[in-house]
Amino acid sequence: MAKVEKSEVVVGAGGSMSLDNASWATVRGHTNASFQYGLDGDSRGSALASSFATVIGIQYNPGRSTSRTVRRVFWAFDTSGIKDMPAEVSLSVALLELESTTNSDFKIQIIKGDPTEGKNGASEASWDSSTETTTDAFDHFVGSIFSGAGSYGGAWEVTAYSEEIEAASLSYSGNSSGGSGTINLFKLNDQARQDIAQYDEFRICIMDVKHDKNDVDPDATYTATGDTLVTDFIYMEGLVHAGNAANRPMLKILQGKVKAGKSDKKPVNDTFTVQGYEAATEQRDVFVNKNTASTVDQVPFLLGHKGPLSLRGRELQNDGSEKSSTPAPHSIASGD
């Protein structure tokens, strides 16, 4: 049986960015963040390189002049060595604390960051796993189409890499800055697996769903309830963490396609049954079952010359599953 490999790709670069302003349109729709915490610490010039600065969420404080805050995370991974679509991919993140006023309403989502060519195909400079983001990357995710600072309109049409994740359902260590977090695995979807195989750089953004993604001004939500301070923040270990590099964000990948291993079966067994197709699979690609982490069993007519499957016009997808197709019905009028 072929050996199925599991691998890890540790985050290369990125940043946790924050913007606060009195205007919801500006704080959500601006192209530049106020500041970011990245690989080299706090971009405002201090020596802070704390994982506690890696935060996702929103805050609403009507007592401040800059009453609305949005925080997003941007990470890039070097996936140049992955050519075939993985069978399964999870994002591993170490979570520290949950600070949530809204509790079950607070959800986050992993979405697609810049494609390889830059933001939405523009000539704008992009970021990758070897180049730290700058504050002008605050809008660097697919679906962020702006005509300028403060322009927005409705929910982002993002490319989702995960389901919406309820913050209260996750596991946290309760440690503050400098402590270790609790590892959580976020399963990525088919689109993410395809992009990992397609692009040398796999970029993601993680954002709040209720307010940021769906364009709901927290003032409209919480003024009526009398809330004077609303905070929905997830604190996590980020690019830098003292003495705990194993807790840096990483992709955990189950190989999707492998070369079949050398068969231990003879071309003709002891009962004189010919099993040449099993003994001749060493150089063939076989797919991986993500549920069992083992290769999918092969059958003769898939491995040999064209047979019943090709006669019925069937094809296989990237993950080895069969493409379904329904032929058009015959038309008497057209003479078929």
Image (tube, rainbow, N blue to C red):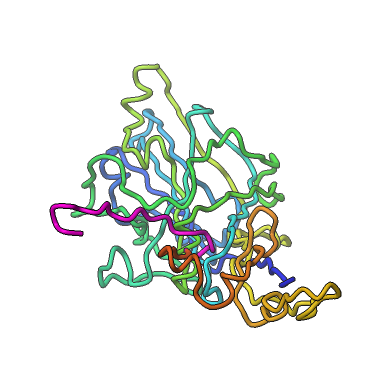
- Name the residue nearer the viewer: 36 or 181: 181
- Residue 208's x, y, as percent? 44, 41
The vertical placement of 314 against 92, above or below, is: below
Split into 4 quadrants, where in the image is the N terminus?
Answer: bottom right
Q: Residue at position x 47%, y 53% from top? A: 73
- Residue 241's x, y, as percent? 66, 59
Q: Is residue 51 left or right of residue 196?
A: right
The vertical placement of 293 against 7, above or below, is: above
Q: Residue at position x 31%, y 46% from top? A: 156
Q: Is residue 121 left or right of residue 269?
A: left
- Residue 216's x, y, as percent? 32, 33
What is the magenta range?
317-336
Question: Which residue lies most toward the left here?
Answer: 333
Question: Which residue lies most toward the top here?
Answer: 225
- Residue 9's x, y, as percent? 61, 67
Q: Is residue 300 left or right of residue 55?
A: right
